[in-house]
Image: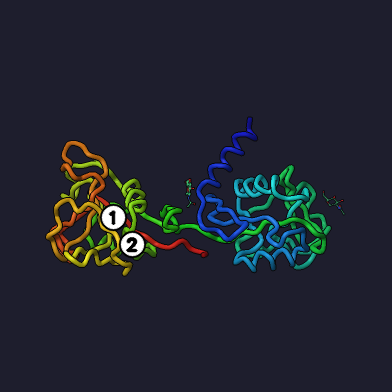
């Protein structure tokens, strides 16, 4: 029973596929692309780390019981040795200063009772009990590589565009743009119906009047509409897609707003995930919106 729950959990994490290198798969909770035996076979510790680095990563590091268990569970069906290398080693037998090859902090340990007991300077994880033992680094084992990949905190990855999206609450254009910049993004641009649908599902979706006078469900995107020229996006991307403009096609130099994606009371008839070209320019700081969306690229790739 417990095992099947774990397996279902793992299957769900794997569904959130992003663009990992060949033979790597994305593990959302680790914000990483993970692979076992990148080089094709068992390796010495140093060779394993080199193989992981060639792919842009390091031997995996784990920082809590959940991560340890997750990596060990994935390893179980993928490795051929009962134990596998992660990126933990120390310089001499006498020191308990263990270092991760990815330079992350040694802030979690899961040593088997009595270990490390001086067998060697490298650590392996046992796929059966998930405990660590120290081994001679010149012994060959299978190994886990990990490449950081994912979105900054607060962002959601959309695997179709392979971009990260963040929903912010309220404010005028300047506030919204400042917030996006502070979370290392830019107000969002939209380039396909898939992206349009993802973003409209991410944001708030009802109609009415919001707390700051802005209409609920009106979500600020990062663009200025110019009739005949399409949208000038804040992130400098091309204007290659426009959605139903909801009749507001005459406005010039006005901000592009996405309307609520659910019809309902207080909603106009075309408030169905349409764009709304507000009559406000971005520099009119009096105009406030219920939400805004920031967009950025995933890190580590
Ligand atoms: C994106 O993720 C969904 C599940 O969230 C999956 O069904 C789909 O195949 C993935 N698409 C791509 C392009 O990886
Ligand atoms: C160290 O621990 C390992 C794993 O429990 C064991 O196989 C090995 O015999 C121990 N070595 C010594 C010197 O105690």
| Count of marks overlaid on the render | 2
Q: Quick one: SS at disc 2?
A: helix
Tell me residue 63's x, y (percent).
61, 53
Q: Are marks 2 and 1 in contact (CB under 8 Å)?
A: yes
Tell me residue 140's x, y (percent).
80, 59
Residue at image position (30%, 63%) is 240
Where, by quadrant of the figure, is residue 153 drawn? bottom left
105 vs 45, left or right, is left
Residue where numbered disc 1 is placed: 292
- Residue 180 disc label: 2
**Looking at the picture, does residue 207 appear above or below residue 84?**
above
Q: Quick one: SS at disc 1?
A: strand
Does the image show residue 107?
A: no
99 vs 255, left or right, is right
Of residues 272 and 56, the one drawn nearer to the viewer in this rendering: 272
Determine if the C-beta at disc 2 is less than 8 A from ligand 1: no
Residue at image position (16%, 39%) is 266
Q: CA distance from mark 2 to mark 1?
A: 9 Å
Where, by quadrant of the figure, is residue 248 drawn? bottom left
22 vs 96, left or right, is left
Determine if the C-beta at disc 1 is less than 8 A from ligand 1: no
Residue at image position (50%, 48%) is 16
């Amino acid at each position: 029973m417990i095992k099947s729950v774990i397996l279902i959990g793992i299957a769900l994490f794997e569904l959130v596929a992003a663009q990992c290198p060949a033979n790597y798969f994305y593990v959302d909770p680790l914000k990483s692309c993970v692979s076992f035996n990148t080089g094709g076979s068992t390796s010495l510790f140093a060779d394993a780390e080199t193989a992981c680095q060639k792919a842009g990563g390091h031997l995996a590091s784990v920082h809590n019981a959940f991560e340890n268990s997750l990596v060990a569970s994935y390893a179980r069906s993928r490795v051929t040795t009962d134990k596998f290398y992660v990126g933990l080693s120390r310089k001499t037998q006498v020191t308990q200063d263990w270092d991760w090859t990815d330079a992350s902090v040694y802030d979690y340990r899961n040593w088997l009772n009595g270990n490390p007991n001086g067998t060697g300077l490298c650590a392996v994880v046992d796929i059966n009990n998930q405990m660590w033992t120290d081994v001679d680094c010149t012994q060959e084992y299978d190994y886990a590589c990990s490449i950081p990949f994912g979105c900054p905190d607060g962002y959601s990855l959309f695997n179709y565009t392979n971009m990260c999206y963040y929903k912010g609450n309220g404010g005028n254009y300047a506030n919204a743009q400042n917030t996006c910049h502070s979370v290392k993004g830019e107000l969002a641009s939209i380039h396909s119906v898939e992206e349009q649908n993802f973003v409209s599902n991410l944001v708030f979706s009802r109609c009415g009047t919001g707390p700051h006078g802005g209409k609920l469900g009106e979500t600020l995107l990062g663009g200025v509409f110019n009739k005949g020229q399409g949208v000038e996006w804040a992130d400098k991307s091309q204007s290659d897609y426009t959605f139903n403009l909801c009749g507001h096609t005459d406005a010039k130099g006005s901000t592009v707003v996405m309307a609520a994606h659910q019809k309902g009371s207080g909603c106009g008839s075309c408030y169905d995930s349409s764009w709304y070209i507000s009559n406000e320019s971005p520099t009119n700081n009096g105009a406030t919106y219920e939400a805004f969306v920031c967009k950025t690229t995933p890190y580590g790739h």
